[in-house]
Amino acid sequence: MASVLLTPGVVRFAETLRSLKSTPVAVAYLCLVPLSIGWQKSTKPRSLRKTLVVYNLVCSALSLYSFGAFAYGVFVSPSWFHKGEVNALKHVFLLYWVTKNLELWDTIFMVLRHRRRQMSFLHVYHHTSILLLSDFCYHHYPWAAMAVPLGLNSLVHVFLYLYYGLSAAFPDKPLTWKRRVTELQIVQFFIGLVHSSLGYLYHGFCVYGIAYGLSMVALFSNFYYRAYLQKRPVNHSKKTS
């Protein structure tokens, strides 16, 4: 059974994963999640409001620049499916990888603020996988073909981190467009799934792109349903004096 699963493609994928510079960081990050339980039991939650304002607005600004640079690089490349290095894209792939390392602080802030409910499987899976993907693209495939989904992700993160930055800056004025950000995330992954599927069918893309796209669409759609569509049980019990 093991020999059937260990196809040449899977073996190459595992070898590439081991060679990534971000793999030790990803492993340490995954260890942080269960260890955070003990930390939260022995400490008090911290506010970090000012830190969160600066952090989120910086991440939003970096994402805005990344989106513009990715868009320009794709524009000057032969096509959206071009599999080859583009000089205009090299620096933004590096910036994107650095930014994904920076965004791991999302989870650290959750730990310090005792926001364990936010540390869902979706949150951890997304941060870990996008970190490894950014490393993989920068060191192996800084192509226009890869810039399309990463550019879309950067665009979404402009609004995502802007939302959290403004929420931290004005805690007494709740923003009303969090649901729209989630919808934008789902649209992003749908577009990325279509791009990777067309690339697989007509341009020799790897099938792993489709698998990853399906996982993200499924996980974010499930989150959207549970957060915004699922009916909450009504408590009919009345208080007695």
Image (tube, grey):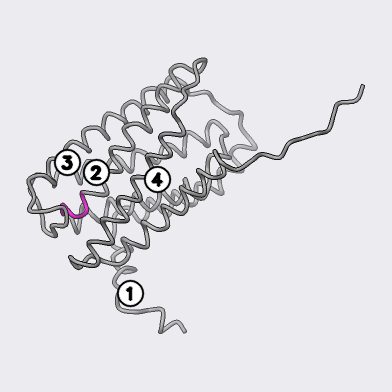
Q: Along the horizontal axis of the image, is 98 left or right of 228?
A: left
Sort mark 1 into few (<14), some (14-19) or many (20+) by Cα contacts within 10 Å: few
Q: Secondary structure under badge 4?
A: helix
Q: In the image, residue 96 lies at what x, y percent? A: 25, 43
Camera-nearest label, 4 or 2:
4
* Residue that label 2 marks: 151
* In magenta segment, residue 68: no
Amino acid of disc 2:
Gly
Amino acid of disc 4:
Ile
Does the magenta stretch mainly form a helix, a strand or a loop?
helix
Depth order, front residue of 71/231: 231
Q: Is 208 placed above or below 241 here?
A: below
Camera-nearest label, 4 or 1:
4
Amino acid of disc 1:
Val
Q: In the image, residue 126 lies at what x, y percent? A: 41, 49
Sort mark 3 into few (<14), some (14-19) or many (20+) by Cα contacts within 10 Å: some
Sequence-first disc among 3 and 1: 1
Magenta segment range? 143-147
Sequence-first disc among 4 and 2: 2
Q: Along the horizontal axis of the image, is 191 left or right of 51?
A: left
Which disc, if any, is residue 186?
4
Q: Is 234 placed above or below 137 here?
A: above
* Residue that label 1 marks: 11
Q: Which residue is depicted at the point 7% across and 53% down?
A: 78
Which disc, if any, is residue 71?
3
Q: Quadrant of residue 137?
A: bottom left
